[in-house]
Image: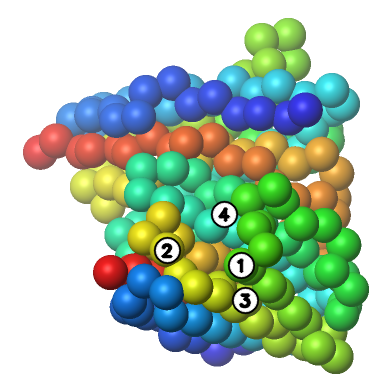
């Protein structure tokens, strides 16, 4: 499968714990985006990378959130000290023009 | 600032009937416009997009949308609904080729037998 992959697909954690998600983009896609989708809402932009450089961060991305894309390949999104309000689907997309979305990681914070 | 408004969070149509999902956008420059579909517990799939050129855009699964600049609209239609069309549909706008996508809140389409 040559699409965007995300791992894990589901994550259940307790409030206060740290979690990390991974996104593997389509090979040679230089742009990578993270979005968050809460129940009943459309996806909201969090951040994006061009190669390894993080070019834009949304106000939604509090200081508990950090994203990296070492070597311009896969990306990780870490949430520290999770809160119940962080429960959402986290979507990754990669692009050389058109954005292709992965299946998402569903986070549940208890 | 760009924004997208989808009219109706839920739309129900009978199988075989016309599907019409409404979308209005706001953009300071000519936008790129999209419709995405999301099936339960799945990611987003691109249905169709408008960038430039012909204002009537055809997509997958028999869907089409028309860009109307004067009305700032990009409504999605399908002549005959099928049970498999039941899903969440998102209208979206993008400023340029490499920019982030701004999504509407979505419309859940229900197909009645």
Measure the alpha-carbon separation of dots 1 and 2. 10 Å
- Where residue A77 is drawn, which disc sits there? 3
Instruction: Give the mark nearer the N terminus: 3 vs 2.
Output: 3
* Label 1 SS: loop
Mark 1: few/some/many CA within 10 Å (<14, 14-19, 20+):
few
From the top left corner, tell me how far across and down residue A110 is, in percent: 28, 69
Are the residues tagged 1 and 2 within 8 Å (C-beta)? yes
Residue at image coords 61%, 67% = A64
Residue B53 in the image, given as x and y percentages of width and height: 83, 33
Marks 3/2: CA distance? Answer: 15 Å
Q: Is residue A22 above or below residue B70?
A: below
Q: Is residue A72 above or below residue B38?
A: below
Where does residue B79 sit, x and y in percent of width and height? 38, 30
Assess whether mark 2 and mark 3 are in contact (beta carbons under 8 angstroms). no
Q: Which residue is mark 4?
A: B46
Q: Is residue B51 left or right of residue B109?
A: right
Q: Residues within 10 Å of mark 4 (few under 14, many from 20)?
A: some
The residue tagged 1 is A64
Circle 3 crowding by C-alpha within 10 Å: few under 14, some 14–19, many from 20: some
């Amino acid at each position: 499968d040559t699409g965007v992959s995300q791992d894990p697909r589901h994550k259940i954690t307790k409030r206060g714990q740290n979690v990390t998600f991974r996104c593997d983009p389509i090979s040679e896609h230089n742009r990578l985006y993270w979005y968050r989708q809460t129940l009943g809402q459309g996806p909201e932009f969090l951040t994006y990378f061009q190669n390894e450089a993080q070019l834009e961060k949304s106000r939604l991305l509090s200081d508990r959130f950090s994203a990296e894309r070492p070597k311009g390949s896969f990306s990780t999104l870490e949430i520290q000290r999770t809160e119940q309000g962080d429960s959402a689907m986290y979507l990754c997309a990669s692009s050389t023009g058109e954005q292709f979305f992965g299946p998402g990681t569903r986070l549940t914070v208890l | 600032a760009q924004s997208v408004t989808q009219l109706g969070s839920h739309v129900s149509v009978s199988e075989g009937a016309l599907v019409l999902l409404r979308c209005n956008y706001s953009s300071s420059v000519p936008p790129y416009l999209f419709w995405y579909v999301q099936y339960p517990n799945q990611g987003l799939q691109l249905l169709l997009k408008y960038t430039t050129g012909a204002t009537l855009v055809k997509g997958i699964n028999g869907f089409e949308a028309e860009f109307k600049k004067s009305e700032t609209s990009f409504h999605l239609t399908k002549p005959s609904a099928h049970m498999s069309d039941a899903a969440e549909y998102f209208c979206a706008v993008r400023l340029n080729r490499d920019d982030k996508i701004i999504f509407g809140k979505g419309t859940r389409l229900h197909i009645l037998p």
